Image (spheres, grey):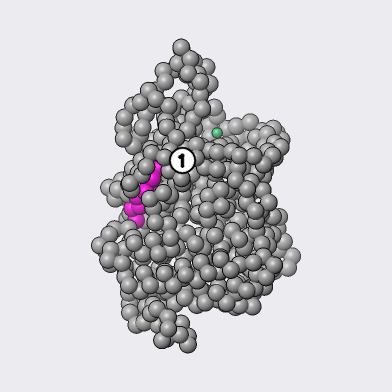
């Protein structure tokens, strides 16, 4: 069973799904704080969904780096891109939080963290809780950290049974098919452009669980777009999805005359690495293709992205988290590219080099691209760009008219094959691009849904109005998000 705890919004902040009500309210609070509440008026619905007085919870407010001007700056940036990535790790606290914070808060990307298990087989530096109880503790710790990373969280069915010396041992406990199936399912559900991992599937990862996480990230990159792989998921309604690139963090290790040290087995092993995408061996250290500048300073947040990530990691106190915040300083995290479905240089500036991550790029997924989609996306992108360029923290309401117009466009970008009649923004029939719409109950209100519309199977006419299908068996837990 795959669990999703944290409901995260992935599209325009002014369009929220019915689920994730607390998030909706949180973003709405932010908008209100900057004087946009009156403009984004459709939120009468959202106010009705807000928790009633007395339902206060620990996360009733966004984390500090999401409040006020900092929060609005982040979401304006997020509106300008469709960049998305998924990171695969084994346990809570394995993640590269600085990289995730950089991509979500710096680059505006939508990010998903897929952690194979809850870390219930680990140690506990804070309390006597172990095994399942520790898994609950670490689940909550990771969710708290995720709010700083800015990610959506998934787990697989794999259970942490304790320290594992080898990849083979972990696969024997879990079974390759079971873990790979869950990874493929999450990729098909979240449709990331890029897959990353902290691990590479070799002895340098140490723990056998880590090695499996590294291997499976690459294997799932290959398998998720193949409809013959786990066809039961396709029958459930998930569509194949091929991420465009896959990366893993470059390991650091020392080469000695005896080879490189494997701390899991306390032995020296040959310096050999396997590429699970190209299915080739190498005796060379994986090259660096991308350096993520986690040490960059976020003026809006007043912290570096590494610091933001460490704030999140600090919530994982059962694992000796909460270590001191590093001083602002240059810091990069290096990643090796294991596969790409687009032309890519050996040295790249970002994970998304060579990928059209603009809003208009969503339409390129459809062939032929529907004209209404192309023009609608361009219109929204233009408005978002203007809003981002003119936003001033001391006068935030100045961008309210632009956001309101964007809201109007987004509403009219509802698409349904059952009704092809064009609709127009009220009062703008003669000046604004025409966007087809429908009067039916289903609406395209999220990027994921737009991507579903622009079907990954090129050449297939858009025909769904209901958005991305929800996989059977996947459980979305409510509550804090
Ligand atoms: Zn770990």
Report whether the residue tagged 1 is closer than 8 Å to ligand 1.
no
Instruction: Judge left or right: residue 134 versus residue 475.
Output: right
Can you say whether 201 is above or below 259 in the image?
A: below
**Residue displayed at 51% across by 24% down:** 253
Q: Quadrant of the C terminus?
A: bottom right
Q: Position of residue 116 (x, y in %)?
A: 49, 40
Q: Is residue 290 something that shows in the picture? A: yes
User: Which quadrant does ligand 1 occupy?
Assistant: top right
**Residue displayed at 57% across by 61% down:** 75
**Residue displayed at 41% across by 35% down:** 215
- 481 vs 284, nearest the viewer: 284
Magenta segment boundaries in residue numbering: 239-248
Residue 218 location, quadrant: top left
**Residue displayed at 70% across by 36% down:** 323
Can you say whether 117 is above or below 458 in the image?
A: above
Q: Position of residue 325 (x, y in %)?
A: 70, 40
Residue for badge 1: 290
Q: Position of residue 139 (x, y in %)?
A: 60, 44
Instruction: Judge left or right: residue 334 versus residue 46.
Output: left
**Main secondary structure along the magenta-highlighted residues:** loop
- 259 vs 265, nearest the viewer: 259
């Amino acid at each position: 069973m795959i669990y999703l705890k944290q409901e995260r919004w992935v599209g325009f902040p002014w369009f929220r799904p019915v689920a994730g009500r607390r998030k909706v309210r949180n973003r709405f609070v932010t908008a209100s704080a900057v004087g946009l509440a009156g403009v984004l008026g459709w939120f009468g619905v959202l106010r009705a969904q807000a928790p009633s007085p007395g339902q206060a919870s620990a996360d009733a407010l966004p984390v500090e780096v999401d409040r006020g001007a900092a929060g609005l700056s982040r979401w304006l940036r997020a509106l300008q891109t469709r960049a998305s990535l998924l990171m695969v790790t084994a346990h809570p606290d394995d993640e590269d939080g600085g990289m995730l914070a950089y991509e979500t808060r710096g680059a505006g990307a939508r990010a998903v963290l897929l952690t194979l298990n809850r870390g219930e087989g680990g140690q506990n530096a804070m309390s006597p809780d172990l095994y399942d109880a520790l898994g609950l503790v670490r689940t909550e710790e990771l969710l708290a950290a995720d709010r700083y990373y800015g990610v959506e969280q998934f787990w697989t069915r794999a259970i942490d049974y304790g320290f594992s010396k080898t990849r083979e041992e972990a696969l024997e406990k879990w079974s390759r098919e079971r873990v790979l199936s869950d990874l493929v399912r999450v990729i098909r559900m979240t449709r990331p452009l890029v897959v990353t991992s902290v691990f590479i599937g070799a002895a340098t990862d140490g723990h056998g669980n880590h090695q499996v996480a590294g291997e499976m990230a690459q294997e799932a990159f290959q398998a998720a777009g193949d409809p013959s792989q786990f066809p039961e998921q396709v029958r459930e309604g998930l569509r194949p999805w091929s991420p465009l690139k896959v990366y893993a963090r470059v390991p650091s290790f020392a080469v000695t005359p005896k080879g490189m040290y494997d701390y899991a087995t306390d032995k020296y092993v040959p310096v050999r690495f396997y590429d699970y995408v190209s299915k080739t061996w190498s005796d060379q250290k994986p090259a660096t293709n991308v350096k993520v500048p986690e040490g960059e300073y976020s003026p809006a947040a007043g912290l570096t992205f590494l610091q933001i990530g460490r704030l999140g990691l600090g919530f994982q106190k059962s694992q000796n988290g909460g270590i001191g915040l590093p001083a602002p300083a240059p810091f990069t995290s290096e990643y090796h590219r294991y596969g790409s479905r687009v032309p890519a240089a050996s040295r790249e500036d970002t994970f998304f080099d060579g990928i059209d991550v603009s809003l208009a790029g969503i339409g390129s997924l459809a062939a032929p691209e529907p004209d209404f989609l192309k023009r609608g996306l361009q219109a929204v992108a233009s408005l978002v760009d203007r809003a981002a360029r003119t936003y001033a923290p001391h006068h935030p309401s100045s961008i309210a008219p632009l956001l309101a117009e964007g809201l109007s466009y987004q509403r009219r970008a509802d698409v349904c094959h059952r009704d092809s009649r064009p609709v127009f923004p009220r009062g703008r029939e003669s000046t604004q691009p025409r966007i087809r719409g429908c009067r039916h109950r289903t609406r395209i209100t999220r990027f994921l849904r737009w991507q579903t519309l622009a079907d990954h199977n090129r050449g297939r006419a858009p025909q769904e109005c209901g958005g991305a299908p929800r996989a059977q068996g996947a459980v979305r837990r409510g509550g804090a998000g």
